[in-house]
Image (cartoon, rainbow, N blue to C red):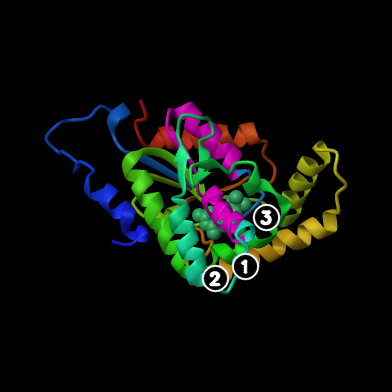
C-alpha cells in the first residue's frame, strides 16, 4: 500500500453508524460547512461558531498552506506534481486536537506559524489548484469528518465537494473592497505598511484563481445559506450563523 492510501485503513476501522441505538442531539453527527472567498473572516467565524455550539473546528486552508510550505521548504519545483504529492503524503499532515485552534502538524512538527508567512500565502492558491493534491486533501478531510463527526469545517469546497450531505452549509461573502479593507486593518495592527490597492488586486486575483480552477472551484452550493458579511461585525456574523444552525438542527 502506498503512503497515500494509508488513511483509507483508518476509515475502514471506524465503526459503522448503529441505527438501533438512539442518540441524543449532542451525540448525533453534525457537520456545518462554511465556504467563501478570502477575507470574509471564515476562519475566525468558524472557530467561534464551533466553540458556541460545542463542535470541533477544521481549518482546511491550513492543510493547503502546509502543502505550500512543504513545496517551498523542500524546494520542490511547482510543476513536479509527483514529488509534491510524495512529500505531502510523507509529511502525514494531521492536527493536534488538544490545542485550540488545532495545531497543523507535518512530520509531527507544528506548522501554524510557518503557514501564515507571506511567501506561503503568495504561492498557495496555484498549489491548492493541483487536482491530485486536492483529492488527497478531500480524502483526509473526510477521514477527519468521520473521526470528528460534530464539526464546523471551513474552506472553499467543504459544502460543495467534501461534505455534500452536511447538515448546514454556509457561504460567507463580502465585497472585494470590504475584504481588502479588513486585510489592511489586520496588517496595520501589526505595525507594517499597507498598500491597499495591491491588496485589492491580490484579492480579486485570488477570487479568480480559486473560482475558475477545474477541481473544487469556489462556488456557492445551491443548498447553502449565503450570508453577506460586508456590513456586519464578526460577532454579528457568528450570532447570525449560530441562530441559523439552532433553527435548523437540535444542537444540545
Ligand atoms: O483560507 P486560506 O487563505 O487559509 O486558504 C489558503 C488557500 O487554500 C487559498 O488559496 C484557498 C485554498 N483553499 C482551497 O483551495 N480549498 C480549501 N478547502 C481551503 C483553502
**Quadrant, the N terminus:** bottom left
Q: Report the image quarter containing ligand 1.
A: bottom right
Q: What element carries label 3?
A: helix
Q: Which of 79 and 243 is in front in this view?
A: 79
Earlier residue among tags 1 and 3: 3
Q: Which of 100 and 236 is in front in this view?
A: 100
Q: Mark 2 points at which residue?
A: 213
Q: Which residue lies furthest to the left in this view?
A: 20
Q: Are marks 2 and 1 in contact (CB under 8 Å)?
A: yes
Q: Mark 3 points at which residue?
A: 121
On the image, which quarter does residue 145 sit in?
top left
Q: Mark 1 points at which residue?
A: 209
Which residue is drawn at the image coordinates 31% and 44% (left, top)? 146
Which residue is drawn at the image coordinates 43% and 57% (left, top)? 89
Q: Can residue 35 be seen in this view?
A: no
Mark 2 to mark 1 CA distance (whole Å): 6 Å
Crowd tier of the residue under label 1, counting other residues whose Cα lies within 10 Å: few below 14, some 14–19, many 20 or above: some
80 w.r.t. 92: above or below: below
Determine whether, in the image, residue 101 is placed left or right of residue 89. Answer: right
Start-end of magenta stretch: 42-71
194 w.r.t. 243: above or below: below
**Quadrant, the C terminus:** top left
Which residue is drawn at the image coordinates 60% and 70% (left, top)? 78
| Residue 173 in the image, given as x and y percentages of width and height | 61, 51
Q: Is mark 2 within 8 Å of ligand 1?
A: yes
Mark 2 to mark 3 CA distance (whole Å): 18 Å
Which residue is drawn at the image coordinates 58% and 53% (left, top)? 65
Amino acid at each position: 500500500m502506498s503512503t497515500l492510501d494509508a488513511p483509507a485503513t483508518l476509515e475502514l476501522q471506524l465503526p459503522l453508524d448503529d441505527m438501533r441505538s438512539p442518540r441524543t442531539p449532542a451525540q448525533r453527527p453534525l457537520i456545518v460547512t462554511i465556504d467563501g472567498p478570502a477575507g470574509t473572516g471564515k476562519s475566525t467565524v468558524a472557530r467561534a461558531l464551533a466553540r458556541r455550539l460545542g463542535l470541533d473546528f477544521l481549518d482546511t486552508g491550513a492543510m493547503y498552506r502546509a502543502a505550500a510550505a512543504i513545496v517551498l521548504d523542500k524546494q520542490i519545483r511547482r510543476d513536479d506534481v509527483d514529488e509534491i504529492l510524495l512529500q505531502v503524503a510523507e509529511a502525514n499532515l494531521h492536527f493536534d486536537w488538544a490545542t485550540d485552534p488545532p495545531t497543523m502538524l507535518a512530520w509531527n512538527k507544528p506548522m501554524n506559524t510557518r503557514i501564515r508567512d507571506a511567501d506561503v500565502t503568495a504561492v498557495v492558491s496555484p498549489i491548492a489548484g493541483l487536482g491530485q493534491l486536492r483529492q488527497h486533501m478531500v480524502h483526509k478531510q473526510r477521514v477527519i469528518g468521520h473521526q470528528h463527526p460534530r464539526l464546523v469545517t471551513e474552506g472553499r469546497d467543504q459544502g460543495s465537494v467534501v461534505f455534500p450531505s452536511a447538515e448546514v452549509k454556509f457561504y460567507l461573502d463580502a465585497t472585494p473592497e470590504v475584504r481588502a479593507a479588513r486585510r489592511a486593518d489586520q496588517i496595520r495592527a501589526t505595525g507594517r505598511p499597507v498598500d491597499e490597492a495591491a491588496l485589492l488586486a491580490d484579492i480579486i486575483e485570488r477570487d479568480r484563481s480559486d473560482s475558475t480552477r477545474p477541481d473544487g472551484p469556489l462556488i456557492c452550493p445551491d443548498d447553502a445559506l449565503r450570508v453577506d458579511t460586508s456590513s456586519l461585525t464578526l460577532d454579528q456574523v457568528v450570532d447570525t450563523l449560530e441562530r441559523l444552525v439552532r433553527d435548523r438542527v437540535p444542537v444540545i
